[in-house]
Image (tube, rainbow, N blue to C red):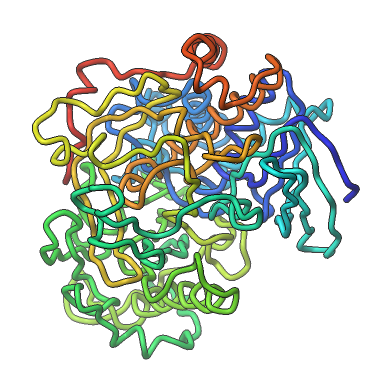
Amino acid sequence: MPDTHTDILIIGGGTGGVAAALAALRLGRRVLMTEETDWIGGQLTSQAVPPDEGVWIEEVGCTASYRAFRGGVRAYYRQHYPLRPESMAERDLNPGAGTVSRLCHEPRVALAVLEAMLAPYRANRQLDVWLDTRPVAVEMDGDRVAAVTVENLRTGERSILTAPYVLDATEMGELLELGNIESVIGAEGQDQTGEPHALPEADPLNQQAISWCFAMDHLEGEDHTIDKPGGYDFWREYQAPFWPDRQLSWTLCHPITHRAVYRDLFGNPDETPHGGDLWHFRRIFARRHYPEGRYASDITLVNWPQIDYWLGPVLGVSEEEKARHLAGARDLSLSLLYWMQTEAPRHDGPGHGYPGLRLRGDVTGTTDGLAKAIYVRESRRIRAQFTVLEQMVGVDARAGLQGAEPFPDTVGIGQYRIDLHPSTRGRNYVDVASWPFQIPLGALIPVRVENLLPAAKNLGVTHITNGCYRLHPVEWNIGEAAGALAAHALNAGLTPAQVYHSPDLLSDFQRLLERDLGVELHWPDAQRLTPSPGF
């Protein structure tokens, strides 16, 4: 790993990092992207989370490159899998037929599609990708990032990387902390933001639950019971004060009403959006798409309320405490699996447990069966020149106004409810309606640092508005806008702040986004004035 200089340095190869790289590459710049795991793709791959997307995603609401990714996933299944003719003919094929999304798929397929999208740029070394590489230090020169030191996790070798522009596409906003760049963690207070659903006072350690996802199939009549996890006895009895039953239970809390809801594993195979049982909720491989007998089981992805770990935060704490909570999240996920295999009430009469549930580490690319990386719902966030508040996008918070606040500096659009999972300070779900929204350029511009841009969930949003800006297509759009901004600034001899503050330069950049990259900047009225639905 030699010391290296490039045009644009992207630290973090997740969903936003890949999109940032694609944009910068298409605009002619050289890119070096590092990634802490051995898979690029983040939420889509190493975290194993099927896309959470807006209700109009098939028609509108994402960039052209994200749409190409979605099309690539469907094409991969049509080309490589023995689909039934009727499934092959489905225009909007949902490979997993999961109810959470119009496109549920295996992480390895997402990885293959993302690698194919980047392959033309790797052929001539316009793009370098360093896997198993994490940032360990940031050198500042006044208001600029001068260098980033990275470490190879396999060899321990370190390198110093430099570039005119550095993008933080890490899952937790790690460059912000390493460079002592103005940032926020946890929850802001109402005295700071005036948001109706903010806490009365700021609490940096109030952070959304993390989840360690896993994939599994089910082979009735076989026994794949894992060893009893070390913390199983604790989790078997644990019940949070705000939760309607024990953590290991089929009784869940409805995120909007907070009422108790019963959802078991197989009892209600309803395939309507957000309906039915847990097996069909995030199913990523549906055997009904294939000839009878070709596959023994569906595969489902467990990212369910039972594995939300809220016993402590992972930002703003010591490395020892962070490691303890990450280990706790792993233990919780394995404990849920063990409970399902041994003690869970069955849907088909008396008896307990489904010992035929089998971890599918081959699907997630791991030996232990869990995803390669924790699913992180909120990151360290930059203090930006503009911050998106609940009053700008929330339906109730806008007090009868129709539509989200329009942003003249829009660099993309997104749609999702304000969806916050239970927090590390014991706060239950915050899940409220929002209007389809825009992504303002000002939220990508730090208040001070000139050459660093956020390219993931670390833009200028709050603890509350992060709840609708954190999902897959929005993170992709954020990354794409950041990569395009860095490349455009280099190509035009400008700074990102100059582009933001000049109406003429801003218009030029927005035209580039629309014309050259296919980024949607505005919602059609039919969607713009329709609140994001609940369930």
Q: Residue 535: percent from the left, percent from the top? A: 16, 46
Q: Residue 435: percent from the left, percent from the top? A: 23, 32
Residue found farthest to the front: 142
Q: Residue at horizontal 43%, vertical 50%?
A: 293
Q: Is residue 487 above or below residue 417?
A: above
Give the mark count.
Answer: 0
Q: Residue at horizontal 65%, vertical 19%?
A: 494
Q: Residue 71: percent from the left, percent from the top? A: 49, 26
Q: Is residue 335 above or below residue 76?
A: below
Q: Residue 80: percent from the left, percent from the top? A: 58, 35
Left or right position of 75 against 436: right
Left or right position of 324 against 8: left
**Quadrant of the rendered image containing residue 534:** top left
Q: Is residue 454 above or below residue 122?
A: below
Q: Nearer the viewer, residue 335 or 376?
A: 376
Q: Residue at horizontal 47%, vertical 84%?
A: 229
**Quadrant of the rendered image containing residue 336:** bottom left
Q: Is residue 291 visible?
A: no
